[in-house]
Amino acid sequence: MADAKVIPFGSPDDGRDRRRGEPVRAVQADSGTSSDGPGAASGGASEEHSDGAARAEAAGGAWEDKLAQGLAFLRRRVTGEYEVDDFGYDPELTDQVLMSLLRPLYEKYFRVEVRGIENIPDDGSALVVSNHSGTLPLDGLMLQVAVHDNHPAGRHLRLLAADLVFMLPMVNALARKAGHTLACSEDAEALLGRGEVVGVMPEGFKGLGKPFADRYKLQRFGRGGFVSTALRAGAPIVPCSIVGAEEIYPMVGNSRTLARLLGFPYFPITPTFPWLGPLGAVPLPTKWTIQFGEPIETDGYPAGSADDPMLMFNLTDQIRETIQHTLYKLLVQRRSVFF
């Protein structure tokens, strides 16, 4: 057998790929064995180093892109080069700031599970009707994030809010920027006429401020004004059921005296508030489920149906019963309030 040829390291024939400076896996002609010596180990380390450097460079590029986007966003804010609609909705601020602030609460704290999001149409108007609970209206905000982050067509939910929301300093401006508007038929019809997805919680303060003993028992849905609005616009009505919000602030009492002094519809007493001061305002980390039901079509009704009080009553009752039945079903399936 011929002797194996010895090639000095660093010579022109040392087995290195001159284009990349990496060792190549050579096969000795005479022995038929591969050379997995120190040069091969060195090559593996070199490849790992290159991969690490590439990842670091990509991460640095991503941070540079984010910084550039952030600076561009601030420039537009300062110069006023951004758009809002006639309701005050600021889509850029909502997408880049408000949703980013709410998302950790949605994903990590309440760990919201969304079902049936495909029941909201990909285009055109729709009216999402949901139960309302939790002492503070966090369910409305979580519902908005659920539609924003999960709908395949990237729909945005425009919530109808109570008068009190637009009477509070700072809250008023933020609600307008997030796309909320007054809960009145005129605003709702205008939004549906533009093909928007509109959200309404007909229980209002009756549902939001109900005692903990009445959790998941729907209150009255009013006189069916939302049904009339959907019929006039020919928009489908999507029932929505939210489980988990009832337990974030268990309301065991209501100080009516303080409520009257502050101009609130109620003043909640919970196991932690006001006894623990600001800490008592931290919601309990319950596990949430938001389910969107099958849409109820309204475009097949004859003209003038929106003025039929019996039809309004029947449709309102149908929607309420659908949401209530779904709530009971979700509660049976739930393993725990917190998991």
Image: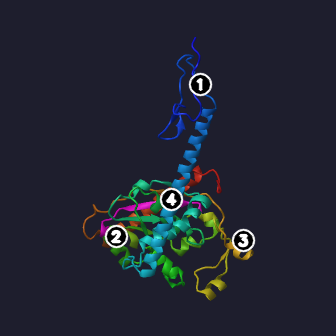
Task: Measure the C-alpha gap from mark 2 to mark 1.
Answer: 82 Å
Query: Element at badge 2?
Result: helix
Q: Quadrant of residue 308?
A: bottom left
Please report contact status of discs 1 and 3: CB closer than 8 Å, yes or no.
no
- Give the residue number, with chain letter if any, for mark 4: 62
Q: For this view, does 63 lie left or right of residue 231?
A: right
**Mark 3: few/some/many CA within 10 Å (<14, 14-19, 20+):** some
Give the amino acid type for the residue marked by disc 2 in the picture: Leu
Task: Measure the C-alpha gap from mark 2 to mark 3.
Answer: 41 Å
Closest to the camera, between mark 2 and mark 1, is 1
x and y percent of residue 147 in the render?
Answer: 45, 61
**Mark 1: few/some/many CA within 10 Å (<14, 14-19, 20+):** few
Q: Quadrant of residue 243?
A: bottom right
x and y percent of residue 57 in the render?
Answer: 53, 54
Query: Element at badge 1?
Result: loop
Task: Measure the C-alpha gap from mark 2 to mark 4.
Answer: 39 Å
**Depth check: 87 or 303 in front?**
87
Q: What stretch is highlighted in magenta?
A: 229-244
Residue at 54% over, 73% down: 206
Task: Measure the C-alpha gap from mark 4 to mark 1.
Answer: 47 Å
Residue at 31% over, 73% down: 307
Q: For this view, does 183 lie left or right of residue 110?
A: left
Counting residues from the start of the chain, the first of labels 4 and 3 encountered is: 4
The dot on residue 272 is: 3
Counting residues from the start of the chain, the first of labels 2 and 1 encountered is: 1
**Depth check: 22 or 235 in front?**
22
Q: Is residue 32 positioned above or below 257 on the image? A: above
- Give the residue number, with chain letter if any, for mark 1: 6
Please report contact status of discs 4 and 1: CB closer than 8 Å, yes or no.
no
Q: Judge whether residue 67 is colored magenta.
A: no
